[in-house]
Image (spheres, rainbow, N blue to C red):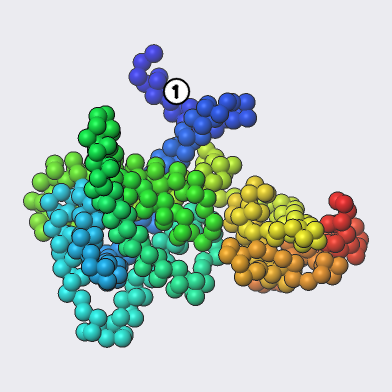
């Protein structure tokens, strides 16, 4: 078999055969291998197509505008511990390490900008703009993550402010704590004695060299768990974080090799070469972060793994069925004093994308059929007694159209014969449902 035939077979396998394998008939090991190959396939696909590339470009622009304010606020938090120079600069150097000597130059320029910022000179308006810039960049990241997780409802303004400020304050503290614990652990007397014994010493120093990599993975995992406006399982965040960490380290090594061999670019672009390299590395880093988030999503919802990343358009029939399923489950738990349903629980139970379920929950809320609790994450309860919620009302909610569609419907030309057919269909449906209520449907299962 020649190379061309082998390549063709591999392409066919990854494009078609990989997705047709029935996981139910495989053992745990083979199933794990197939799932891993599918995840890697998705990662490669997201690198080459989709909206993640556009969002990564957008985040590059946002980063250029906000990098100094973000580091300035983190700097002020670390300054309270007296470790701002020992933590901020090494972390930034680590991030820009693939840029080689230019990375060190950019690092000290940014640190210089931050040190020259004085809150007293900025005034209250300048400080407010500084905080707004920091909050806006995290909001941009959350928007990208919500797009990946198919969440249309962002955090409320109050939650954004509290969560984002907490993230900005806690992030540097966790970073400082992890570095401090690592240093304390390595200088411990007992650890030093164990290290002096082989092969423990070799293993220990080998793991110590990988500490920066572990910290990168931990940062990815932290972002995947807390930035999206939904509950992300730790295992899913771990899978995405580890794979993103591997991609980031690999990309860093490749980019460093590219920088070393790019002396011609410096000759062409002169002083702009540093900025161009910095922007390219920012783009690669953001793209890896978003791809890792996409992998976390598919790991948490593996039944959404398909050969194509198509947007699901639910039919009117499925829309109506989904409405009744949601209200049946919520009503059943409510009547039997069980735990209220959350969005994630309904998605897991119904095996449907988050956006489809979330859209129907929003419609049911607008029709005053459901209410959202103030819990975190919020749960859903009937807005009134089940005896007062008719099945006809649920069907009408499922068929609810937006204002644009209604405007078109009022102006469209029609014929009496068509209206007669439609009236007979709607009349038959209403007669079939009668005055049956949600309570009757729920108790029919008892």
Occupied quadrant, residue 335: bottom right
Residue 183, visible in the rendered structure: yes
Disc 1 secondary structure class: helix
Q: Which residue is mark 1?
A: 9
Percent position (x, y) of residue 275? Answer: 18, 58
Say if 299 sits above or below 17 in the image. Answer: below
Q: Residue at x 39, y 43 (%)?
A: 242
Number of numbered discs visible in the structure rendering: 1
Closer to the camera, 198 or 423? 198
Closer to the camera, 208 or 147? 208
Percent position (x, y) of residue 333? Answer: 76, 58
Say if 378 sits above or below 267 in the image. Answer: below
Say if 183 sits above or below 201 in the image. Answer: below
Q: Residue at x 64, y 53 (%)?
A: 345
Q: Residue at x 15, y 62 (%)?
A: 108
State left or right for residue 25 relative to residue 172.
right
Occupied quadrant, residue 107: bottom left
State left or right for residue 396 relative to residue 296.
right
Closer to the camera, 182 or 265? 182
Percent position (x, y) of residue 34? Answer: 51, 31
Residue 415, visible in the rendered structure: no
Q: Which quadrant is the N terminus positioned in?
A: top left
Residue neighbourhood size for the residue with mark 1, other residues' Cα within 10 Å, grouped as few (<14), some (14–19), many (≥20): few
Say if 434 sits above or below 49 in the image. Answer: below
Q: Residue at x 71, y 51 (%)?
A: 318
Percent position (x, y) of residue 183? Answer: 25, 51
State left or right for residue 65 relative to residue 386.
left
């Amino acid at each position: 078999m020649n190379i061309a035939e082998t390549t063709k077979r591999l392409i066919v396998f990854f494009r078609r055969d990989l997705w047709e394998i029935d996981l139910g008939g495989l053992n745990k090991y083979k199933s794990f291998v197939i799932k891993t190959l599918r995840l890697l396939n998705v990662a490669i696909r997201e690198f080459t197509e989709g909206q993640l590339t556009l969002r990564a470009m957008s985040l590059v622009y946002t980063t250029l505008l906000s990098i100094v304010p973000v580091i300035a606020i983190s700097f002020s938090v670390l300054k309270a511990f007296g470790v701002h120079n020992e933590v901020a600069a090494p972390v930034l150097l680590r991030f820009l390490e693939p840029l080689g000597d230019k990375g060190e130059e950019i690092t000290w320029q940014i640190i210089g900008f931050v040190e020259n910022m004085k809150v007293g000179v900025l005034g209250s308006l300048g400080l407010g703009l500084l905080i707004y810039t920091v909050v806006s960049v995290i909001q941009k990241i959350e928007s990208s993550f919500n797009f990946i997780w198919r969440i249309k409802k962002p955090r409320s303004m109050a939650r954004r402010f509290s969560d984002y400020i907490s993230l900005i304050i806690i992030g540097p503290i966790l970073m400082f704590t992890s570095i401090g614990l690592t240093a304390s652990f390595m200088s411990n007397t007992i650890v030093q004695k164990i290290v002096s014994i082989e092969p423990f010493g070799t293993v220990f120093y080998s793991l110590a060299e990988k500490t920066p990599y572990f910290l990168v993975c931990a940062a990815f995992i932290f972002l995947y768990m807390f930035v999206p406006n939904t509950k992300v399982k730790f295992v899913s965040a771990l899978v995405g974080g580890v794979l993103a960490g591997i991609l980031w380290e690999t990309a860093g090594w490749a980019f460093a090799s590219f920088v070393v061999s790019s002396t011609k670019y410096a000759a062409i672009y002169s002083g702009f070469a540093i900025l161009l390299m910095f922007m390219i590395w920012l783009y690669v880093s953001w793209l890896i972060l978003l791809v890792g988030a996409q992998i976390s999503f598919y790991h948490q919802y593996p039944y959404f793994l398909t050969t194509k990343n198509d947007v699901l358009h639910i039919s009117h029939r499925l829309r109506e069925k989904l409405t009744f399923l949601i209200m049946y489950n919520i009503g059943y738990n409510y009547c039997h004093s069980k735990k209220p349903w959350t969005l994630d629980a309904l998605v897991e139970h119904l095996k449907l994308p988050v956006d489809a379920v979330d859209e129907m929950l929003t419609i049911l809320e607008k029709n005053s059929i459901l209410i959202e609790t103030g819990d975190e994450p919020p749960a859903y309860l009937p807005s009134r007694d089940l005896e007062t919620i008719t099945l006809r009302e649920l069907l009408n909610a499922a068929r609810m159209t937006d204002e644009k569609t209604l405007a078109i419907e009022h102006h469209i030309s029609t014929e009496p014969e068509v209206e007669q057919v439609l009236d007979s269909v709607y009349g038959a449906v209403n007669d079939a449902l009668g005055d049956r209520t949600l309570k009757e449907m729920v108790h029919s299962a008892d």
